Image (cartoon, rainbow, N blue to C red):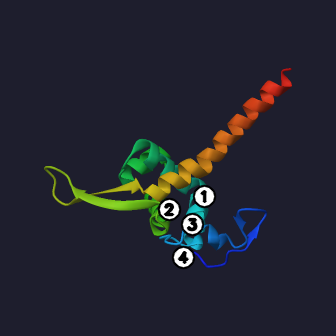
Amino acid sequence: MATDHTHTVGGDVPEDPEDLLPEDSILSLDEYLAMHAAVGHRTRYEILYRLIHSGDMSPKELEQVINIDDSTLHYHLNKLVDVGLVEKRQRTERGQDGLYTYYRATVFGKVTLTEGVEELIRGEQAFEAMYDSSTEN
């Protein structure tokens, strides 16, 4: 929850980073930081990337596209689930007994990836394009 400290530094930037959170924030600053830390690992980033850009996937599908063993995959999936970037779902498949398990990115996972890491990459591409065009003159 946001604190009631309202001191600012340099204009509209709060002195306390907790004050960046909306008053009715459902997550704490520590939870947001845990999300960013989780996606900072290459394997977890790739899992989240695949789930966002390819859609829901089973563990077997993820193992194949990422080329990772089952225990390592589940370790990283559990980390992503624990911080709320990915959710584990189950459903019954037509004509089969038992449940089919699959994973999907949450809204927080999509925002963390697309507005976080991917935005940094797009920023670098834009900077390179600006730098390249300025050196051609």
x and y percentages locating residue 10 in the rendered image? 79, 63
Of circles 3 and 4, the one toward us is 4
Q: Please, what secondary structure does the residue beneath circle 3 have? A: helix
Does 43 sit above or below residue 79? Answer: above
Q: Residue furthest top?
A: 137
Q: Secondary structure at mark 2?
A: helix
Which residue shows up at 76% across the image and 62% down it?
11
| Distance in Å between CA atoms under marks 1 and 2 | 9 Å
Query: Marks 4/1: CA distance?
Result: 27 Å
Q: Amino acid at mark 4?
A: Met
Asked if residue 36 shows in the view, the reply is yes
Q: Earlier in the sequence, mark 3 or mark 2?
A: 3
State the residue in front, 38 or 114. 114
Above or below residue 64? Residue 78 is below
Q: CA distance from mark 3 to mark 1?
A: 15 Å
Determine which residue is flagged by label 1: 41
> Dot 2, how many residues are within 10 Å of its Cα: few (below 14), some (14-19), or many (20+)?
some
Query: Disc number at residue 1?
Result: 4
- The spot of residue 16 in percent (x, y) is 69, 73
